[in-house]
Structure formats: structure tokens, C-alpha cells
Image (cartoon, rainbow, N blue to C red):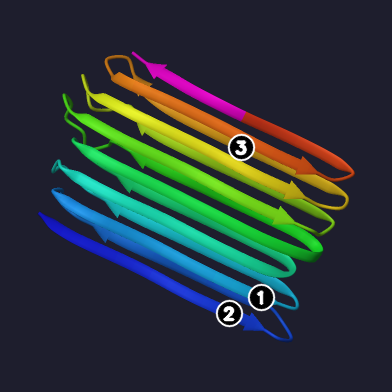
Amino acid sequence: MSEGTQVLTAAAFAADGSAYQDAENYMSTYGDDILGQSIFLNAVATEDVTQYGYNYEDGYYDPNYDIGQEVWLAGDGAYVYQDAYNEAYFSDLADVAQFIALSAISDDAGVDQYAENYAENYWASGESTNNIGQEITGAATGGDASYQDFYNYADLYYGDLSTYNVTQINTATLSATDYADQYLYNWIDWYNTHTGSIAMDILGDASADSVYQYHENWVEVYY
């Protein structure tokens, strides 16, 4: 049994200009591991704020795999762009927990927020019990026009005759002056011989002069 932790933390303050932050954690392991990846970014600027956070882990063939991934982005500026992504590939007997939290305040143009949790059982042989939890929470306030696109995706095409317990939560609030555009997705690819449980929850709130929302819980079953 091995354990590994990666943590990236950064704070930026631009008194007269823009702030740019880009953080990435990468791991490639061979199972029987307890792993954690965390990114914490905070930025305040008088002009634009741009933030990227990316966690990647590939567990390969070996089973007994526990991975926790989290990205926290907080930005305050004239325009705020945030992009967060957790990505994990695993085998059998896996526990996967992925979390993204975005917070942004704009005093001019608006906010663009993108977030995705992606977990795939690419290396699974089958006949195992696995637990997957994916959650995204986002808040965007202010500006003329703002946009949110949040996606939880569990790709469980492989691992014949396995049990998967999956929970997906997608929560977002969006407030702008002129236009608010919000897309929230929970998606699962599921092989027909799997057993287990699925819980999907979406809660979206948006306000502006003009609002567009599209929210989707989707399970695709393969034979």
C-alpha cells in the first residue's frame, strides 16, 4: 500500500492590471494506492482574472485504488474566466471522489465558468465493487453577461459484472445584468451487466434580464 498527496496553492493580487493562474497536478500509479490531489487558487485584479486548475491521475491495471481530487478557484475582477478539470482512470475495487468549487465576482464584462469531473474505469477487469462521487458547485455574480458550463461524467463502459455506486451533484448560481447562460450536466455511461446504485442531482439558479438554462441527467446503457 502506498500513499501520495499533491497540493498546489496560489494567491494573486493585481493592483493595476490582470491576474493569470495555471495549476496542474499529475500522477501515474499502479494501483493499491491512496492518493489525493488538491488545487487552491485565489486572485483579485482591477482588470481580467484568468484561472486554470487541472488534476490528472491514471491508476493503470492494479486494483485497490482510492483517489480524491479537488479544485477550488476564487476570482474577483472586471472579467473572470475559470476552468477546472478533474480526470481519473481506474481499475477494480476503486473509490473515486472528485470535487470542484468555483466562485467569481465581476464588476464589468461578466464571468465565464467551466468545470468537469471525469472518471473512467478504463483498466477494469470486472467482478468488483466500486464507489464514485462527483460534485461541482459554482457561483458567479455581477457583470453584463455570464456563462456556466458544468459537467459530471462517469464513464463505466468497462468492468463486466461489476457493482458501481455513483453519486453526482451539480449546483450553480448565476447572476448578471443583461444575460445569463447556464448548462449543468450529470452523465453516466453504464454497461448492461453492471449492478449498483445511481443518484443524480442538479440545482441551478440564474437571474438576468435574459436567461437561458439547460440541465440534464443522463444514463446511457450499453449492450
- Point 20% across, 45% down: residue: 65
The amino acid type found where label 1 is placed reads Val
- Residue 41 lies left or right of residue 211; in this view the side is left
**From the image, which quarter does the N terminus lie in?**
bottom left
| Residue beneath disc 3 | 184
Q: CA distance from mark 1 to mark 3?
A: 26 Å
Judging from the image, what secondary structure is the residue with disc 3 in?
Answer: strand
Q: Which mark is drawn over residue 89?
A: none
Rendering coords of residue 25 (x, y %): 36, 64
The amino acid type found where label 2 is placed reads Ala
Judging from the image, what secondary structure is the residue with disc 2 in?
Answer: strand
Q: CA distance from mark 2 to mark 1?
A: 6 Å
How dense is the environment of label 3, judged by Cα within 10 Å: few (below 14), some, or many (20 and up)? many
The region drawn magenta spans: 216-223
Farthest residue, direction bottom? 15
The amino acid type found where label 3 is placed reads Leu
Looking at the picture, does residue 69 appear above or below residue 150?
Answer: below
How dense is the environment of label 1, judged by Cα within 10 Å: few (below 14), some, or many (20 and up)? many
Rendering coords of residue 35 (x, y %): 25, 56
- Point 61% across, 73% down: residue: 43
| Residue beneath disc 2 | 12
Q: CA distance from mark 3 to mark 2?
A: 29 Å
How dense is the environment of label 2, judged by Cα within 10 Å: few (below 14), some, or many (20 and up)? some
Q: Are marks 2 and 1 in contact (CB under 8 Å)?
A: yes
**Mark 3 or mark 2, which has the lower sequence index?**
2
Judging from the image, what secondary structure is the residue with disc 1 in?
Answer: strand
**From the image, which quarter does the C terminus lie in?**
top left
How many numbered marks does the figure carry? Answer: 3
Farthest residue, direction left? 1
- Point 66% across, 52% down: residue: 139
**Mark 2 or mark 1, which has the lower sequence index?**
2
| Residue beneath disc 1 | 44
